[in-house]
Amino acid sequence: MIELGGAAPKARWSVRLVAAASLAVLVIGGLAVKLAELQVTYGAQLALMARANTVHRVVLQADRGVIYDRHGVALVANSPVWNLEIIPAALPNDARARAAELEELAHITGLQKTELSAELRAADPYGSVRVGADLTQAQQLAVRERLPDMPGASIAQHAVRTYIEPMTFGHVLGYVGPLNEAELKRLKPSGYQPGEVIGKVGVENGLESLLRGKDGWADIEVDARGQVVKTLNSQAPVPGDSVYLSLDAKLQRATAQSLAAGLLRDHKTAGASVVVDPRTGEVLALVSLPGYDTNLFTHGIGQAEFKKLLDDPNRPLLNRAISGQYAPGSTFKMVTATAGLQEGKITPDTLLGCPSYVNVNGWIYHNWASYNLGQMNVAKALAVSCDTFFYQVAAMVGDVTLAKYARAFGFGQSKDIEMPGVMPGLVPDRIWKQLQCGVPDLNSDACRWSTGDTITFGIGQSYLLTTPLNQAVYVAALANGGSVMKPTLVHDVRDASGHAVQVLNPQVTSTVPASAATILAVREGMRQEINPPYNMNYWFRASGVPADGGGKTGTAQWGGSGLDLPTHAWFVFFAPYAQPEIALSIFVERGELSEVQAAPIGVDIMKFYRANVGAIRAQEAR
Amino acid sequence: MTWRRLDHLQLLLIGMLATLGLMTVFSAGADWGRQVVWVILGAAAYVAATVFDYRRLRPLALAIYAGMLLLLLAVHLVGHTALGARRWLSVAGFPLEPSELSKLLLVVVLAAYLSRSDRVSWRTFGAAMVLAAPPACLILTQPDLGTTIVIAGVLIGMLFLAGARAWQLFSILFAAGAALPLLPYLLHGYQRRRLEIFLDPTQDPLGAGYNLLQARIAVGSGGFFGQGWLHGQQGQLGFVPERATDFVFAIFAEEFGLLGSLILLAILGTLLIRLLRSAAVAPDRFGELLAVGVFVMILVQVVENVGMNIGVLPIAGIPLPLISYGGSATISTLAALGLVQSVTLRRRAVAIADSNSAALGTITRRAQA
């Protein structure tokens, strides 16, 4: 059937066959040239794109340091939350499947589909984009079940700060939040990345450098579906340090409760209290009321909620304990007494009158009592809080010396504590008053320091301002014999492996230039005030707390000058009398009667301290 | 001796392509075992086609044509739908893609028709058009733009090589030019989108432009030497879509680099020239046109497939002959090549042999009864 022919048949290449062959060679040659261009000229660039496709650097979030109280009670937790993350490039290519998946993702996140699409379009196609709000445990489990059918979508877990008792500890701890633009600009050199959280207020801010961990990273290889194939390189994150505050959680709670109860009893809305250890300057409790829920800030606060906090007339966001500046009123009289005694203007036995008013150059300055209380020494003058007695002492000492003593007790001095927003208060003097006038005019009463300014300065009025923290440090100095301690909120700091990074190192900021006898005479006045026959003793008897210590009330006028001005109520206190281990200040905003409104709160705190904390601290000391 | 008359180079090239194809399909993670079966079945078809005297096909042309139309109609009536196109028939549990088969069948039909005379009259020209139109329409409406393009290429290529006059070929160009404004209406949405994306791939890098971009990235990252068999990052991690079929060349280029790709192109190019040589030695016009038709069929597929893989041509679903995964394509390509081998085998023997050979050759340009 097949004819056997020669071994070398002659091919007949027609013109058209040659043309076809040439065309084939030409076209394939052309493809080869384009191929060479792609693989050689653009090879490196496209290889980089391939790497960008598959290798992603992910940040391994470092745990922020945990904050404990002095006994190791955790006050904050890094709680897990879940978010939906989408790698835009890994979504289905098929337009219909893609639309369907976006539909479902929009449903899960509660976003509009158009919104979601826009968000994804704006993002790095090969990176993970976090979309929507935090998912609950139930939500994230439901989403996880659907993940195999949703290429490109994944669930990512990260930690969010949860504050254990925000209403009690909120003003001390503060809260964290994502960096704003200004912070990012400022902190970029320190390695902060966009979207990172930073302490905004409270010790979260004050101890940011300790609490902040060092984020790690991992280079992971992912496939087209966004599934991790393997980890190429990584560096483990280093958690932040653990901070053990000087706060005693129980005492803090008791302080907050006592203050809240006191405010409620007298229909007051705002107040503050600071309890310190006069031996070390450690802050054992620091409360400002009203508080606010700091968890709102870490778990996402709505515009409306935030506006409500901002517009609240009681200003819950203001930490009155450190940022509120108020006249100290009669609680300042110990400074005037110290100055008078130390400067030799009076002795502990000097008797001065306590009339219902004094007349200075035709200006009348009243005592709180409308009748003459008779002759008295400085201790009794403190115990009955005679204004006219201290007008006389202040006039003898003079404003310049009085200001010197006030500053020595820490008034008007910045308190360097581990929180932002600490206000220094104000100690006025002649120069300060001059500067208050735009154009200094030595002949104007508004600019010139008057004797009236001096004597009201002596009872903690005039232009004097203090903070509850300052008050506690001041009374602590009286308690410990004249050392103004540097207040601190930190007991010690340990790194992730438990090694001490920072230990308590009590520091004396300044020493009051007063002899032991002077301090003793002043303390005697404070002792008498809370003991019989004076009314203040009632609260101790009623509570069953021994009046072993020293206290001083103060009802400070504010908002100008004249009669019937609104007042704030103060109570400062230290105990026990012989070897004080606690010093505190109570502030009741708009309190009218310090003996009735502020003092019982202090007694209440003291009662708790004696019953609970005292025993624990005694144990600690041993 | 029959063996000595075979085109050995063609056999060698086919063997190399099939081997590279299997390796690439394996790397692309497709059903490798199945592809081995296809290649074995294709080899059987190849042998059968070689042994079979192609000249006996000519009287069957009408029946073949009718059968082809029936198959294509059947696809429209009872075919399976996948990826938005109705292309598959289920035959004894195996998926059959008649459009793949129809490329070869149309080559046979056109070769039979055009070999009726030595010239291409306007009448013959028109009749060829009319013959090609129904299968082209049936395939285009599946929709399968890629195969339609191959069929158009086969038609034009075969007309040219059959000796169509310049005016006739120009008239096709004119018609095509005139139809161009109608193109947007003829194409399906996604086909139009592919064309737009081809013109500007950056306009939707994650949607329609994704395939194109990812294929380019894969090819480019192959560099000169390639990343090595089974080590192409883009391919192995699934970034290249349709990586065993339409974009198999991207996988190949990523793993074997420019060096491997040039070798592959050289093999394909040599095979194509070999097919033309078969035409040049064909004993009759039918055989010549058969070989020429298979040449055009394979050339168009190679150019379009490689072209779209490297981003110089718009995307259309066309397999790379003997490399892409797929039963219908593999078997019909091998059968087509077998037919060409059959033509070569039955070539004219020359009367005057060179040097030492003194065989008795007779020119056999007449079909045997």
Image (cartoon, rainbow, N blue to C red):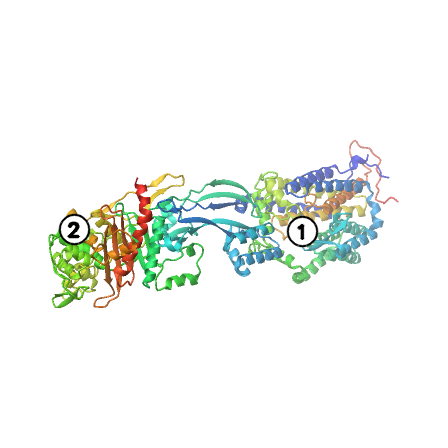
Q: Amino acid at mark 2?
A: Ala
* Horizontal and vertical percent position of residue A72: 38, 44
| Towards the viewer: B327 or A526 | A526
Protein chain holding label 2: A
The quadrant the C terminus of chain A occupies is: top left
Protein chain holding label 1: B
Element assignment for label 1: loop
Question: Where on the picture, by quarter, is residue B323?
Answer: top right
Residue lying at the far right of the rendered structure: B369
From the viewer's perspective, tell me whether residue A184 is left or right of residue B364: left
Q: Amino acid at mark 1?
A: Gly
Is disc 1 surrounded by few (<14), some (14 to 19) or many (20+) residues within 10 Å?
some
Q: From this viewpoint, is residue A14 visible? A: no
* Horizontal and vertical percent position of residue A181: 39, 55
The quadrant the N terminus of chain A occupies is: top right
Identify the residue at horizontal 29%, vertical 47% (top origin): A282
| Residues at circles 1 and 2 in contact by the CB criterion of under 8 Å | no
From the viewer's perspective, tell me whether residue A47 is left or right of residue B34: left
* Horizontal and vertical percent position of residue B286: 80, 48
Is disc 2 surrounded by few (<14), some (14 to 19) or many (20+) residues within 10 Å?
many
Q: Which mark is residue A396?
A: none
Q: Badge 1 is on which residue?
A: B317
| Towards the viewer: A206 or B263 | A206
Q: Badge 2 is on which residue?
A: A521
Q: From this viewpoint, is residue A524 visible? A: yes
